[in-house]
Image: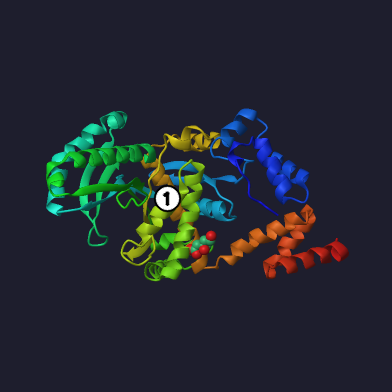
Amino acid sequence: MNNAVAGFSKLSKQEKIDWIANQYFSSPNEAISLLQKYWNSDEKTQKLHDEFIENTITNFYLPLGIAPNFLINGQYKTIPMAIEESSVVAAASKSAKFWATRGGFKATVLNTEKIGQVHFLYSGDASHLDLFFAQTKAKFFEDTQALTKNMQQRGGGILDIVLKDKTEALPNYYQLHATFDTKDSMGANFINSCLEQFAKTLTENAHQYELFKENDETVEVIMSILSNYVPNCIVRAEVSCPVAELEEKHITNPHEFAKRFVQAVQIAEIEPFRAVTHNKGIMNGVDAVVLATGNDFRAVEAGVHAYAARNGSYSSLSHAKIENEIFTFWLDIPLALGTVGGLTSLHPLVKFSLEMLEKPSAAELMQVVAVAGLAQNFAALRSLTTTGIQEGHMKMHLNNIINQFEATDDERALIQKHFKKHTVSHSAVVNYIQEIRTTIL
Ligand code: MEV
């Protein structure tokens, strides 16, 4: 079958749906009604979602869950999490509850600098380019004044622009490396607009520069784009308490627990195979809040993993220590987030999430997100170093199977009692349900 289509983007939404349904589905009507089932009954809301992207055919749901009782810098927060993976919200809530009685989470924004670059080629004497840059630098700021005016009024703007010689790595390759403060916006549009203006200023002024003309030296801009690597936009989240206070139902020997926990973190610090999974657990918390608050989780993911590999080997984002009988567990993470602009004022559930977080500044949101990551990491390591994660997962799994078989309350009680003593597997549960349905009840 020929599945190619011309002019697809010009078709109406209904025409697109009809084309897909007829092209790929044995029962086109069923396919269409499935798509319709996921439409929002409110036309205005649906139109809003349609227009977020191109070629929208329906909505793709993710559950939005909440994790309450997060004590962060002395204030209780309820954290919104958009995620499809079971156990993540439960783990966050458990960690929140655990640390709320042990001083809570401390979160500190260490810096908030964003980065953008104009990548260009220059063939000529590097000292001429240095001279040109020194003479033109002020012009880059002048020419972007119309763009930076509003941001400056909010206390942000372009922090600095430096010329970088990268010719050792790639012949003729230089950069204008610019740093920005974008306050409460993520700043992608602002940064990219400034960069494109820098590129224009660079090209125009280089063209007229006598020293370049005399020596046949040329500047060729390749591209201008922000960097999602933000190693100077870091937030630290931390928990700490006397080792003895770690004791609870699953931690009967807090000293042993703390020691094993620190060792587990040290393994992730030196072993990339473990570090990736360790950090994936952190990102379970981070991405869920980033998504619920309308931020770009792909940008965050890319930047975070580059940061985790900044010393040449992929390593843990979190660290732990026991000093003078005090257990401390912390996470440093680069997060370029916004609480204004972008999707934040458009997506109704993003607005809801931000209001639930009491309309945070970007810096406050960085703190919340980092805490969600640390909480997730704590929950994972606590399970891994004590009971193992399958116990919790299997409980969820058991519940899912029970729901699938539409068990009555009596059946549910019996099944749960039975599988406290027996290993959960899909077939074991199905067999047991059949057994009680034919013999016991
Ligand atoms: C699963 O989504 C996340 C964990 O694998 C994280 C970890 O191993 O630390 C449990």
Vertically, is 277 above or below 283? below
How crowded pointer 1 is (Cα within 10 Å; few <14, some 14-19, many 20+) is rated as many
Where the C terminus falls, by quadrant? bottom right
x and y percentages locating residue 298 in the rendered image: 46, 50
Where the N terminus falls, by quadrant? bottom right
Q: Secondary structure at mark 1?
A: helix
- Along the line of sight, which residue is nearer the eye, 32 or 304? 32
Residue at mark 1: 300
- The answer to whether residue 325 shows anywhere in this view is no
x and y percentages locating residue 332 in the rendered image: 35, 55
x and y percentages locating residue 247 in the rendered image: 47, 62
| Residue for point 21% across, 48% down | 218
> Where is residue 264, by image quadrant?
bottom left
Vertically, is 380 above or below 97? below
Residue at the limit of the structure toward the right, as seen here: 438
| Residue for point 41% across, 67% down | 268
Q: Amino acid at mark 1?
A: Val
User: Count the marks: how many?
Assistant: 1
